[in-house]
Amino acid sequence: MIEQGKAPGLSIATQWDNVFFDFLLSGLGHFFNLFVAARIAAAAAVLIFFWGAFSFIAAVTDSAPWLVTPVLAAISYGWTFNAGLLNYFISIGLTFFAIAIVYRGWSRYWFVAVLLLPFSYLAHALALCWALGAAVYIEIARRVPSLVNVLLFLGGLLAIVAVRFYLRGHALTKPPSHSAMFYSGLDRVFFTNRYGIVVLVIWSIILAACLLALSR
């Protein structure tokens, strides 16, 4: 209605981050009704995240991660999706694609990674910041000895702790009253806390897969 001038006194503000999904939904709305457009846009968001995560894991492990596909599917339809944080959801998926290219060192495809970054920013700036930091970390880790890699990893952990204390000292913060499932990251898999046994089974599968991979 605002675009058609049917809402006097209202205008659409210009914004270039956290709006990718909104643009996608608006564009689809020109061809479908809002109900159908929302379903198509949400499905596109899930596919971007799923295949982005799949590509990232494949790049790191040097093999297609079909064994963890059910877990990826559960995460794709988990808390972040149900909470409606779809711009962040899409941005993370796009940055996964970009980081996969950087990690594999495919120099001839770097332009693809660079082209993905503006779209990632359009979706959410936070994921883009993570992608740039991860790319820098990967490149440094490749150029230094193994011992320095350990120190680099510990330095990253210390930086996270330092940021935490800085924010606590310079911003009004309140510790969240979340369950252990939230802090484990599995809240992204389930929208409620009613599936404790399923969470336990998934963690068991993940642990078994890690032990199997280390034993090879």
Image (cartoon, rainbow, N blue to C red):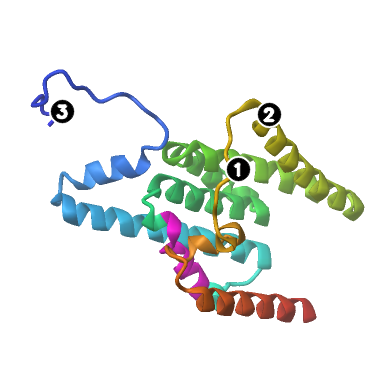
The residue pinned by badge 1 equals 130
Q: Are marks 3 and 2 in contact (CB under 8 Å)?
A: no
Q: Residue at 44% across / 62% down in the picture?
A: 78
The residue type indicated by label 2 comes to: Gly
Left or right: residue 144 versus residue 137 is: right
Q: Earlier in the sequence, mark 3 or mark 2?
A: 3
Q: Which image quarter holds the N terminus? A: top left
- Rendering coords of residue 95 (x, y %): 53, 48
Q: Is residue 108 left or right of residue 144?
A: left
Q: Is residue 59 above or below residue 148?
A: below
Badge 1 marks a residue whose secondary structure is: helix
Of 80 and 194, the residue lying toward us: 194
Residues in magenta, as a range: 70-80
The dominant secondary structure in magenta is helix
Nearer the viewer's eye, disc 1 or disc 2?
Answer: 2
| Residue 155: percent from left, percent from top | 81, 43
Instruction: Give the residue pinned by disc 2.
Output: 169
